[in-house]
Image (spheres, rainbow, N blue to C red):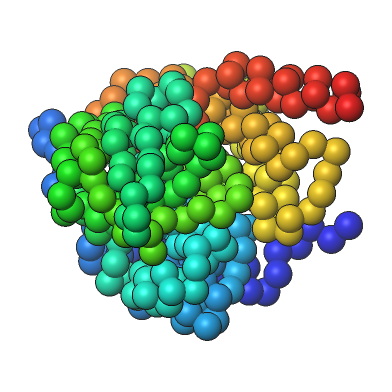
Amino acid sequence: MDFTFTEEQQAAAEAARGVFAGVAPDAVPSPALTAGAVAEDFDRALWSRLAEADLLSLLAAPAYGGAGLDAIALCLVLREAAKVLARVPLLEHSAAMAAVQAHAGEELGSALLERAGRGEVVLTVAASGRTGHDGAELAVTARQEGQEWILDGVQTAVPWAYGADLVVVPAHTAADRTVLALVPRLHAGVTLAEQVSTTGERLAELRLESARIAERDIIDGDGAWEWLRDLLATGTCALALGLGERVLRMTSDYTSKREQFGFPVATFQAVAVQAADRYIDLRAMEATLWQAAWRLASGAQGALPVSGDVAVAKIWAADGVRRVVQTAQHLHGGFGADVDYPLHRYHAWAKHLELSLGPASAHEESLGDLLAAHTLT
């Protein structure tokens, strides 16, 4: 089989590298982690450059001004974004646009997608549920009343909520199905309470109290939430991979220059073995990521549903990104904790990604349930 990325996918990655070339975490301290401050907004200037490079509309169809690419192309771009800790809602925005295009009606798609592709409307997704430990679709209830839907409930840790215009909220109905509601940030019955992530970025607890949403802004497609959830998880794995690759490169550069007993520490066997182990982690993260992204992009049928491939990718990403940054901190010594050096920022972002993905043991249990069900059938 040919595993080479297509020309269009490679072009998207190249365009991303060009846009992110001016973002240098090792030269520009994050406002979110300076003296304990909290970032008020995401990087709007970078957002505009992404829009100008058509990277916000990667997954949108040409009819909506997009490139019509797939989850693989998005993951390639996210991988580059993570290398510079890009402070933009690229994953959530792109995934929400893809869900609207795939599962919403033509009216909503026409009204929203072109503007979102130009960066004029910012989208995010509430995917953590009420506590971060239960299904996000269970945290909010939705009931239809005439031409409106009424939403009640709480979603925690909504990323970029204070800068977004619309929040895609999964909600369950009395008929035990899940719908997606596009909830305006400034709307009657909608309140935000500030939360702060390990990265210093501003999150929000989203409270819905009899919030009335027009029927046009409800996505009631079969499997829409499950598909969106898998795309968000796969994109998070891509972020973990890009961050890990950047951190291993930083570690390689540092240990090649740092000397002990007259020799670079990179030449010591104990250092080389640890670095090699982390390289293996990254290659496993990469292989499982592309498998999951390919399943999402192609819709290919396999022995297990696509959620099985996503679970495998999450297992490797959650454990792998943690091991990479821990080894980096160890091999950097005290220098890794210096706030004038960017490694501490990567460590904080890695912890946030690990928590977002959830513990590997939970995904292993889910994968075991899938395998058991498949064996029984």
Q: In this rendering, would 241 be left or right of 85?
A: right
Residue 330: quadrant of the picture: top left
Residue 20 in the image, given as x and y percentages of width and height: 38, 62
Q: Closest to the observer: 23 or 198? A: 198
Q: Closest to the observer: 127 or 221? A: 221
Residue 184 visible here: yes
Say above or below: 164 vs 150.
below
Residue 5 in the image, given as x and y percentages of width and height: 70, 64
Residue 182 in the image, given as x and y percentages of width and height: 35, 55
Q: In this rendering, would 257 be left or right of 198?
A: right
Residue 370 in the image, given as x and y percentages of width and height: 75, 26
Residue 254: quadrant of the picture: top left
Q: Closest to the observer: 338 or 1? A: 1
Residue 154: quadrant of the picture: top left
Q: Residue at x 21, y 37 (%)?
A: 209
Say above or below: 125 vs 332.
below
Q: Quadrant of the N terminus?
A: bottom right
Q: Residue at x 68, y 32 (%)?
A: 312
Q: Closest to the observer: 197 or 305? A: 305
Q: Residue at x 38, y 42 (%)?
A: 143
Residue 27 visible here: no
Q: Quadrant of the C terminus?
A: top right
Say above or below: 119 vs 38.
below
Say above or below: 285 vs 64.
above
Q: Residue at x 52, y 20 (%)?
A: 359
